[in-house]
Image (cartoon, coloured by chain):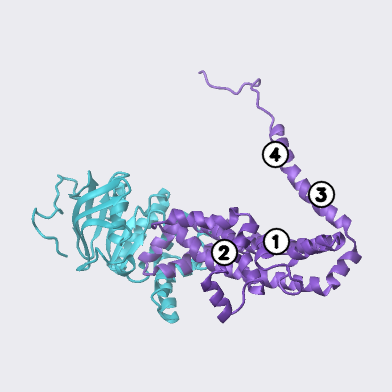
């Protein structure tokens, strides 16, 4: 699971202060917020790509606040996908396994599984410039999932896609969740997307996380721990 | 309903003067280079060329130039890749000073570079090295060192710009996938820097080939020992043997043209980032 306790992060002139929330194991939490509210900064802090000024990040029961990004066991799909232009789709799906020195047979098996799950079998020899938006998004997702992460962080994964591709991706994300059970924190500013996918809906507003009941009634900081309470995974 | 229309009387300026200006300004320089090459070709004759290539001393200078330039290029890239990457990616105390120091070999007069090397090798430490390891001053290693001192500065600048153009976000994502910084550099960054590497190698090689001032001061101009092609041109001119000097310079032009052609052909191969 994910547990954030009183997290303070600075990114240039922007700062997040005192962020606290939890996502239970296996849950699909969607975090909404306006552009510039700090959603990406928060995800990057959880990944280990942004230094934390104070507070704690817990992943799967471990305090990972000072742990390097490579050792956090997180799958991350950035908003810009950041695919590697020189590598084929096969190389992308295998990347996390190659750096972990898996043997070739296991890598080939895992790449095959991911290609089946994400419909990438016919694209394995292609490089990113030859992929459509939807295909590139599948590759980014496959790359993030390849080493069986326990936590998946998605930064606006569907924002650059057209309507019909977005619907396909909704179904795909649901299928991935069904198959892997991975704890997911999905950031978006699209309400329809949030309502379709979320087990829990959180919002980031004025530097504060609030939970929105999915039946749409009321609001409240349900996910905030009581003052003085310790956050433990 | 009133709506905007493009009036048939709207005057759109012709692009002809713009293109004429570009062509004239650029064309003057291109013509100058072409005229210089044509003059050299017209001045020499096949007999002069064959005579130059038949000379044992000139053949030695050609061999030494090709070997020393190649070694210099390899050494320059060994330095330029890590240094260019460090400078492109990281902030550290004194970075501004190192940045300025890297430009010194580019802006200094070549003779001053040679003099600085000569003085450096008069120090106690350098003399101990020469006494106990191998001779440098006025020997073949000094040719390579003189070429390296200048050529590497160009290679570093090229690699710095190359790495700056590669999105560092990709390395960040590679870290989240479990890679170390070294693996991210090897698997993600270096393949994308291939064209920059070729450019850096070409610049280094070409610069090393044309290096004369530092070699003259630091290595001397001893025939059959530290003589490289630019030195040959100088020595032949000093002996009023203009035909031989022009013939040798044509050899250098042909060598440089072959290298540039190979690089252009290699560079024309589509990079994975091209559609």
Residue B35: assigned label: 3
Labels 3 and 4: the sequence-earlier one: 4
Labels 1 and 3: the sequence-earlier one: 3
Quadrant for the C terminus of chain A in the image: bottom left
For label 2, the SS is helix
Q: Nearer the viewer, mark 4 or mark 1?
A: 1
| Chain identity of mark 1 | B
Task: Give the CA separation, mark 2 to mark 3.
Answer: 34 Å
Q: Nearer the viewer, mark 3 or mark 4?
A: 3
Quadrant for the N terminus of chain A in the image: bottom left
Q: Nearer the viewer, mark 2 or mark 3?
A: 3
Q: How many marks do you count on the picture?
A: 4
B83 vs B43, left or right, is left
Q: Which residue is mark 1?
A: B210
Q: Chain B drawn in what color?
A: purple
Residue depicted at x 61% and y 68%: B145
Q: Which residue is mark 4?
A: B22
Labels 4 and 1: the sequence-earlier one: 4
A54 vs A34, left or right, is left
Task: Give the CA separation, mark 1 to mark 2.
Answer: 25 Å
Q: Which chain is cyan?
A: A
Residue B194: assigned label: 2
Where residue B48 appears, x then y in whole percent? 89, 65
């Amino acid at each position: 699971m994910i547990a954030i306790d009183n997290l303070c992060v600075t990114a240039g002139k922007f700062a997040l202060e005192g962020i606290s929330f939890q996502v239970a194991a296996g849950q699909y939490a969607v975090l909404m917020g306006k552009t510039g509210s700090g959603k990406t900064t928060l995800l990057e802090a959880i990944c280990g790509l942004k230094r934390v000024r104070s507070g704690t990040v817990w992943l799967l029961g471990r305090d990972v606040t000072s742990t390097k990004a490579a050792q956090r066991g997180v799958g991350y799909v950035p908003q810009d996908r950041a695919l590697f232009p020189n590598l084929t789709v096969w190389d992308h799906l295998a990347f996390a396994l190659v750096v972990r020195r898996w043997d070739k047979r296991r890598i080939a098996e895992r790449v095959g599984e991911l290609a089946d799950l994400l419909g990438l079998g016919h694209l394995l020899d292609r490089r990113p410039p030859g992929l459509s938006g939807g295909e590139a998004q599948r590759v980014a997702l496959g790359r993030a999932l390849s080493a069986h992460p326990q936590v998946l962080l998605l930064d606006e994964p569907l924002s650059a896609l057209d309507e019909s591709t977005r619907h396909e991706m909704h179904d795909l994300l649901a299928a991935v969740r069904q198959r892997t059970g991975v704890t997911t924190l999905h950031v978006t500013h699209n309400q329809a997307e949030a309502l379709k996918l979320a087990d829990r809906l959180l919002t980031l507003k004025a530097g504060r996380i609030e939970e929105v009941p999915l039946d749409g009634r009321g609001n409240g900081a349900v996910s905030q721990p009581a003052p003085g309470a310790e956050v433990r995974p | 309903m009133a709506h905007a229309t493009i009036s048939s009387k709207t005057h759109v300026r012709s692009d002809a003067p713009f293109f004429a200006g570009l062509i004239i300004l650029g064309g003057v320089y291109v013509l100058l280079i072409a005229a210089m090459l044509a003059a050299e070709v017209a001045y020499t004759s096949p007999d002069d060329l064959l005579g130059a290539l038949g000379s044992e001393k000139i053949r030695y200078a050609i061999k030494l130039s090709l070997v020393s330039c190649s070694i210099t290029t390899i050494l320059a890239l060994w330095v330029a890749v890590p240094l260019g990457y460090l400078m492109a990616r990281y902030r550290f105390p004194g970075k501004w000073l190192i940045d300025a120091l890297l430009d010194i070999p580019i802006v200094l007069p070549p003779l001053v570079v040679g003099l600085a090397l000569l003085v450096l090798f008069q120090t106690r430490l350098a003399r101990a090295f020469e006494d106990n390891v191998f001779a440098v001053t006025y020997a073949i290693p000094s040719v390579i060192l003189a070429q390296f001192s200048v050529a590497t500065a160009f290679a570093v600048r090229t690699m710095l710009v190359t790495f700056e153009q590669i999105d560092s976000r990709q390395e960040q994502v590679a870290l989240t996938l479990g890679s170390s910084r070294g693996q991210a550099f090897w698997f993600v960054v270096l393949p994308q820097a291939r064209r920059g590497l070729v450019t850096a190698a070409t610049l280094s090689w070409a610069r090393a080939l044309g290096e004369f001032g530092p070699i003259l001061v630091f290595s001397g101009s001893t025939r059959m020992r530290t003589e490289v092609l630019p030195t040959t041109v100088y020595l032949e001119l000093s002996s009023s043997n203009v035909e031989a000097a022009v013939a040798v310079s044509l050899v250098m032009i042909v060598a440089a043209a072959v290298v540039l052609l190979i690089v252009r052909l290699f560079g024309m191969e589509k990079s994975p980032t091209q559609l």
